[in-house]
Amino acid sequence: MTASNSDGSRENQVKILLVGLDNSGKTSILTCLKGIKNISAFSALRPTRGARWEDFEALNKAYLVVDLGGQKAFRNGYLNDFTNFLAGTNKIIYVIDVQDKNRYDEALEYMDRVIKQLCNPNTIDFSIFLHKFDSDFEIDENDIDKLFRTIKRVVPPNFNYSVHKTSIYATFEKIIIT
Ligand SMILES: Nc1nc2c(ncn2[C@@H]2O[C@H](COP(=O)(O)OP(=O)(O)O)[C@@H](O)[C@H]2O)c(=O)[nH]1
Ligand SMILES: [Mg+2]
């Protein structure tokens, strides 16, 4: 049996917080992380109400993923209680639906509030997923440039983070912005 820590995680377990607006694709990404390849598992997804804790093993590693359902009604609650969610966290994945241009501002405003909750920002691996970057999705280069510029404006100086183009329909592709 593995020992439990006070934050609910277990020894050697990787704890990941999945954060982002509702409908950005967090639960679908969690489903991918769990290695469920059956496409019907995706169509059965319902909006996540509140936080969902998932404990699983993949590629011989133990994970605890906290999927913070992104509906507006819950966001302030998470932010007020963020230290509890953060305890023992190794990685935060902030998910932005790249196909939903109308909500970029709202997504980045929420990301800004999340980053402001991090007391020691560089002790946690922070990844931004530009999600729903499907292979057939045609994005206007101006829009993506603007999105990158806004991300750089929102993150504090010297903040370590990485940006990834992701899609549940493709292998996750890593990109770097500087
Ligand atoms: N086109 C596309 N749709 C996606 C992708 N990932 C998730 N979705 C869809 O986006 C919707 C919201 O996904 P969900 O995982 O429930 O979002 P959540 O509210 O952030 O948990 C669902 O209809 C998913 O099928 C993706 O990579 N590409
Ligand atoms: Mg969800």
Image (cartoon, rainbow, N blue to C red):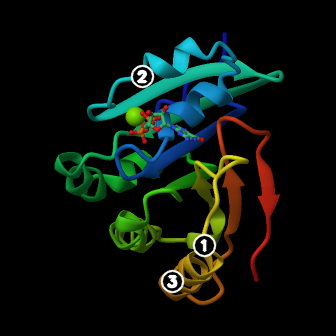
Residue found 68% across the figure and 65% down from its top:
163
Query: Residue 6: x percent and y percent?
Result: 46, 34
Residue matched to label 1:
140
Judging depth in this view, the residue of 149 and 135 nearest the camera is: 135
Is 10 located above or below residue 86 in the figure?
above
* Quadrant in the picture for the C terminus: bottom right
Q: Are marks 1 and 3 in contact (CB under 8 Å)?
A: no
Q: Secondary structure at mark 1?
A: loop
Quadrant for ligand 2 reads top left
Q: For the residue with label 1, is its CB less than 8 Å from the closest atom of ligand 1?
A: no
Corner quadrant of residue 111: bottom left
Query: Residue 67: x percent and y percent?
Result: 44, 37
Residue type indicated by callout 3: Thr
Labels 2, 1: front one: 1
Is 157 located above or below residue 100 in the figure?
below
Query: Is residue 74 found left or right of 5 in the rendered image?
Result: left
Mark drawn on residue 45: 2
Residue found 61% across the figure and 65% down from its top:
139
Residue matched to label 3:
150
Query: Residue 155: x percent and y percent?
Result: 53, 81
Judging depth in this view, the residue of 159 and 152 nearest the camera is: 152
Query: Residue 40: x percent and y percent?
Result: 55, 12
Q: Secondary structure at mark 3?
A: helix
Residue found 32% across the figure and 31% down from its top:
47
Q: For the residue with label 2, is its CB less than 8 Å from the closest atom of ligand 1?
A: yes
Ranked by sequence position, the earlier of labels 2 and 3 is 2
Ranked by sequence position, the earlier of labels 2 and 1 is 2
